Amino acid sequence: MQKTYYDPADLRKFGKITEWSEELGNKFFDYYGKVFEEGALTAREKSLIALAVAHTEQCPYCIDAYSKDGLQRGITKEEMMEAIHVGAAIKSGATLVHGVQMMNKINKLDG
Amino acid sequence: MATKSLKKQGSDLAKSNKQLEILSNGIFQNGELPTFKNKISESNQFPLKAKTLEILQVNVGYMCNQVCEHCHVDAGPDRKEIMTQETMQQILDVIKTTGAHTLDLTGGAPEMNPNFRWFVEEASKIGIKDFIVRSNLTIIRANKKYYDLPDFFKKHNIHVVSSMPHWTRGKTDKQRGEGVFDMSIKALQELNAVGYGMPDSNLKLDLVYNPSGAFLPGDQAAMEKDFKKALMEDFGIQFHNLFAITNLPIARFLDYLIASENYEDYMYALVEAYNPNAVKNVMCTNTLSISWDGYLFDCDFNQMLELPVNSKAKHISEYNEELLEGRNIVISQHCYGCTAGAGSSCQGSVA
């Protein structure tokens, strides 16, 4: 197989980051675990948010992890794709809304 | 989707020794992952010992009207193995002498055994507390001769446990075959109509969820909530409990894992999710699994891998409580499937 920067098998090694900085690594994983517990939002809702963010962040490890997590929770592929569209809409909206800044600048300089 | 069993296809994976070879070699042989024996030894749980017998799980035959993608029995319409009335009588004789309180009939589709109704009627007379039939639901709608099964179950106060891969048509049909979802929904409605699954009803109707692919089941309570909401809103269906069961890497599921190049990742996932607390309550410690021809196994999975009980008593006709109680349970890497996360057994989560 052709070598790439990303290796799917590296996801299994994620926990090993604590080996080079145990305290900070453990704090991160404690925090991470706590964030995904059931709270005001269900774990199911959090999984869908994570999947959408995984796409906007373009993290292939996170995409693999939360696609699988969604399946484990019984989330349908239609629900998952809708979540990705929410992420995509925010991402494109965030680009476009900066157009107002461009318009402001143009109007000021060249009004 | 395959329409024939692995056995009928002449697949190598229909052979138990081939499956055991895969489970013993590769990532387990080269030490990449610990064997199940080594893993349970870490918490001083090896050897795993059988406790007092509570559940008799009887596989009355591998014949089935469905060919599900992940069937660990490799059951299907082309399988002809069927338990005889003589073997059933031997089982009834044993039940009378033991304190077993649960009789769990499985298959294939147990209802397709021609002696099924006779066995249920005879077994009903001997005071079993929980009499389970693992019905695939579609059998109730498969042929006119099965249409009265809901009433038959009700008459004998059978506890119906049925597989339902998902509350959506697509996922269910993918795993269990085209049209299975609609027939299952109709069958569930018919069971509800005679009183099964109602909140205050003694007519127990439980569903079994197992994942449709190479991933582990999610939290059982959360899945049950989602199933109940969806089946009620979409079809007005009620049921009691949902059992979330992990797919074990044997037979057709093993074949699928290898063909889809998911085998190693799945074994990693099982080993990573290993929960030593689940080991204490795995079903093999209080269950005997009896094959269609009367042989004794620690569980249905060992039956399919042809790993008989570690005892001089190997057949129901040789049943001997002293010889069987305290026996060492036979294990291999597939046992990781019952100890992942909250653990799973035919009765759902164990930890």
Image (cartoon, rainbow, N blue to C red):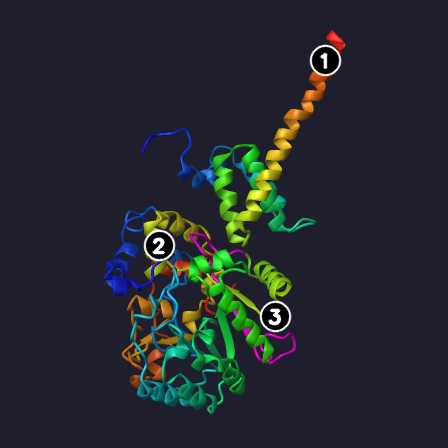
| Circles 1, 2 touching at the beta carbon (< 8 Å) | no
The Cα–Cα distance between marks 2 and 3, rounded to whole angstroms, is: 32 Å
Residue nearest the viewer, comparing B77 with B304? B77
Residue B189's spot in the image, x, y percent?
57, 72
Residue at 37% x, 70% y is: B300
Mark 2 sits on what residue? B256
Residue A5 in view of the camera: yes
Secondary structure beneath label 1: helix
From the image, state whether disc 1 or disc 2 is nearer to you: 1
In the rendered structure, which segment of residues is drawn in magenta?
Answer: B195-218
Q: Which mark is residue B283?
A: none
Secondary structure beneath label 2: helix
Residue at 50% x, 37% y is: A18
The prevailing secondary structure element of the residues shown in magenta is loop
- To the question of a shared chain for discs 1 and 2, the answer is no
Q: Amino acid at mark 2?
A: Tyr
The Cα–Cα distance between marks 1 and 3, rounded to whole angstroms, is: 62 Å
Q: Amino acid at mark 1?
A: Lys
